[in-house]
Image (cartoon, rainbow, N blue to C red):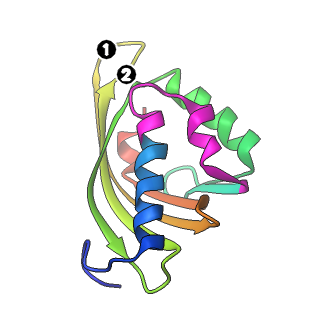
Amino acid sequence: MSSAMSHSSSGVDRNVAAIERNFAALSREADVDRYLAGCAEGFVLEFPFGTATRLEGRDAVRTALLHAFRRVSLELTFCSVYHCQDPDRIIAEYQSAGPVLATGAPYANSYIGVFEFECSLLRFHREYADPTRAV
């Protein structure tokens, strides 16, 4: 794996732009359908820490994200992107911040995400976060 932003190719750049677009749809707007439009039909979303979860398919991901965004409003910010030898795999560091909707209390977390693409669509996302900060 190379350092952040040191590898440049149209496929990698396209995939980074896709991640940014998909996360912009979730950031504050919580537009889950717009997010899923950038995902492959068999999209898989994994959360290996805390209550380990593997969501398979857009419908399962839609249900889980809609549930999550009823509890919290998030602003997602990318910190670093790391390119892998495989241009269809990217590792990114990002952060979230926003209020818990029921109480107004602040919520924040830091993440590492592994993203894999197929035909410019996100097909896999594994998110590592601090489970002690769960809402």
Comparing 12 with 112, the one in front is 12
Residue 100 circle label: 2
Residue at x 30%, y 27% (from the top left corner): 98
Q: Give the range drawn in magenta.
A: 24-42
Secondary structure under tag 1 reads loop
The residue that mark 1 highlights is: 104
- Which amino acid type is shown beneath numbered disc 2? Val
Task: Name the foreground residue: 36 vs 98.
Answer: 36
Q: Say what secondary structure mark 2 lies in.
A: loop
Percent across and percent down for residue 81 are 31, 65
Crowding at mark 1 (Cα within 10 Å: few <14, some 14-19, many 20+): few
* Residue closest to the far front: 10
Q: Is residue 103 left or right of residue 69?
A: left
Q: Is residue 116 above or below residue 69?
A: below
Image vertical order of residue 19 relative to residue 134, above or below: below
Residue drawn at (53%, 30%) of the image: 68
Q: Quadrant of the N terminus?
A: bottom left
Q: Quadrant of residue 52?
A: bottom right
Circles 1 and 2: CB distance less than 8 Å? yes
Indicate the position of residue 95 as horizontal and vertical percent values: 29, 47
User: Does the magenta-highlighted stretch encompass residue 28?
Assistant: yes
In this view, 65 is above or below 46: above
